[in-house]
Image: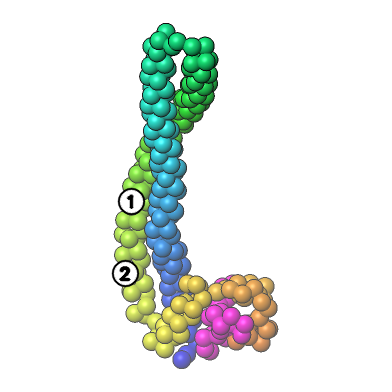
Amino acid sequence: MPQAAIKKQTAFLKELQTIDTQIYNFKGRLDEIPLVIVARNKEFQEQKTGLNELEEKQKRLLLARKDKEIELGGKEENMKKLQGQLYQLKTNKEYTAMMKEMDGLKADNSRIEDAILDIMLQLDVLKNDVNKEKTALDEKEKVLNAEKIKLSDEQKGIDQKMAVLNGKHKQIAENIDRKILKIYERILKGKDGLALVKVIDGSCQGCFMNVRPQTVNEIRMYERIITCEMCSRILYEDDD
């Protein structure tokens, strides 16, 4: 291929690489957006699970308080019965035994009342925690929904830009020799969207390794497409 043709092909490749770099970056962002949404949903669900656990604990404490209140009610009924029987006793022995039983009930009642009070204190703290978590979760859900809308809009915008860029890619690619284009596309696919790189101060800007002076001269001669010996990317130099 004549020197002028290679030079022209290189110019088209430079245009194509500019387009493809944008396409590659947009594709990367499109791949990233669903992952961002998954991560945000996970964070939200974890916080929601935390709230559910607090609410379950709240339910358990309410049931425990109810059980204690029922237990206390039963013992108070027993106390009333014993008090009613107290004046029917005929001997000191019976009276002493009854008083001992009543003292035991009083001690039991005191322990149950302490347990109920402890549960109520826990419920007060828990109620405050639950309300705080609900408020935080509601706010997080609003932020999450707003972010999803923003990401969806961004995705649509990228899709539109990609459509334009793909059209430009096609137009430019039509001007490139099939064999050269095939080489370019193979490298593009295997090198993270970067198939064509500049040589600056004798260094490949793809792998940043030194390029032999002979290779630099070959690039300047435009006799053929030259690739980097280290990273296999197509090399070019800007004309002075």
Residue 104 versus residue 184 in the image, above or below:
above
Image position of 41 with respect to 58: above or below: below
Q: Which residues are magenta?
A: 219-240
* Three-letter code, disc 1: Asp
In the rendered image, which residue does mark 2 sit on?
167
| Residue 177: % across, % down | 40, 86
Can residue 134 be seen in this snapshot? no
Of pointers 1 and 2, the one earlier in the residue sequence: 1
Q: Is residue 227 magenta?
A: yes
Q: Position of residue 56 (x, y in %)?
A: 40, 39
Residue at (43%, 70%) from the top-left corner?
A: 20
Q: Residues within 10 Å of mark 2 (few under 14, many from 20)?
A: few
Q: Looking at the picture, tell me which residue is in the foreground, 83 or 63.
A: 83
Say which residue appears at 44% left-offset and 47% top-offset: 46
Task: For marks 1 and 2, give the CA distance.
Answer: 22 Å
Say which residue label 1 marks: 153
Callout 2 amino acid? Gly
Does dot 1 land on a helix, a strand or a loop?
Answer: helix
167 displayed left or right of 192: left
Q: Position of residue 128 (x, y in %)?
A: 46, 27
